[in-house]
Image: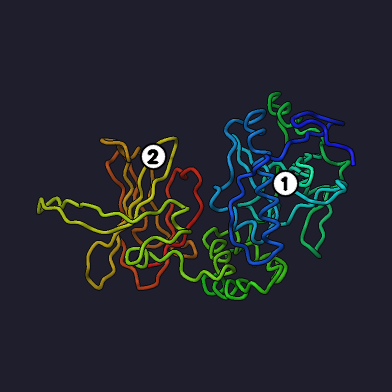
Amino acid sequence: MLNAPPPFTIDSQHLYLEIPQSPEVQEQPYSTPGAYQRGWINQTCLQAFLPWFKEEIAPTARVYPNSAALPSFWEVVNGTAITFDRDRLVLIPTLAIDDDELRVPQEWVDIPEWAADYYVAVQVNADDGWMKIFGYTTHQILKTKGVYDPGDRTYSLESEDLIPDINVLWVTRQLNQPEALRAEIAPLNSIAKTQAENLLERLGDRDLKFPRLVVPFSLWGALLAHSGWRKKLYELRQGLLIQWSIPQWLQTGVTNLAQQWGWEKREFVVVAAIMRSAERFLGLSRQIIVAEHTYELRIFPKTASEDYVWRFELQSTTPGGQIPAGFKLRLLTEDLQAFENNEDTATTPVDMLYLEVILELGEGLVWEIEPAPEDYDREILRF
């Protein structure tokens, strides 16, 4: 077998990258051997491609939505999304020897929240320690020229229809030439909480090897579009039952999965303005970054009564720092519905945004902040 060209060189218009000698592959649980292999090849591909892409084309490039979310994608579908500037690309790795086509799972094309501007085809040769970028295309071309296969729900594009040299992407961006990157795609109808719960119970069975092909795409796509339900599906397929229970976190500690998302248990000292007295509350905290500034989101029980009153606060972590005008702290139901008094908006710079809600035992909420925090991915917090 011929040796690959030296890493970081172009041969026959294709870029070859060296796979790191000791890739930092994080051991994550997956429900099937196929899912485990999918996670491994995607992580290996990402660790070779992202450093090169940041150095040569887009210094701001980062994983979308964040690294902690990746196993919940790879459990059910091939591909890894990267955002850079205002665009998004998806890496589609393959172990196939022949690089005659790019096959993109429908999820990356027809779920509006997942769709990308570019799709990059990658051939991974793990035995010889290199991978080949054998071409890329745009969403527009994939939708108009690609062949849709309803059997495995993929869009395929022949290699001759791909742009072989990934550096062309950099050139076109430097020339700032207008280009139609994305085709129109129909929005997916939202699904009700009860229907989502039924789907999760059915698809969360790890004996289902290909859950993505079991139900119509309209239901499957709508389920995955909700990040909280996507995570729940992953957890169920690992046999993890309750991972996002706020009362449980306060009693027994934050789960390992939630710690990966930045949550920690803390004691807060709250000073009552009228009584001028301080009370201590045990609550949850995580730091978020918005426009390169760090803020803290806090959740704690307002009282010890049976009313189950919970308080959400957003503050700056900088001493004396404020929340800028225009920021919003918002709470939604589990199926993303608004309710009365579910939003607090900073009309001028303020020290804090906060919301207080009365919740039933076991009720779920989703928090949102505008502008959207870096690495934001919806979470369903259960109370």
User: What is the number of the mark on residue 95?
Assistant: none
Residue 45 vs residue 204, the one in the foreground: 45
Residue 276's place in the image compared with 348, above or below, is: below
**Residue corresponding to mark 2:** 294
Point 54% across, 47% down: residue: 66
Residue 301 in percent (x, y) is at 27, 62
Q: Is residue 208 left or right of residue 251?
A: right
Which amino acid does the dot numbered 2 rest on? Thr
Q: Is residue 74 left or right of residue 67?
A: right
Q: In terms of secondary structure, where does tag 2 sit?
A: strand
Residue 33 in percent (x, y) is at 70, 64
CA gap between label 1 and label 2 equals: 36 Å
**Residue corresponding to mark 1:** 183
Find residue 135 and report its image quarter.
top right
Point 26% across, 54% down: residue: 267
- Image quarter in which the N terminus is found: top right
Residue 283 in percent (x, y) is at 30, 58
Residue at the far left in the pictured view: 275
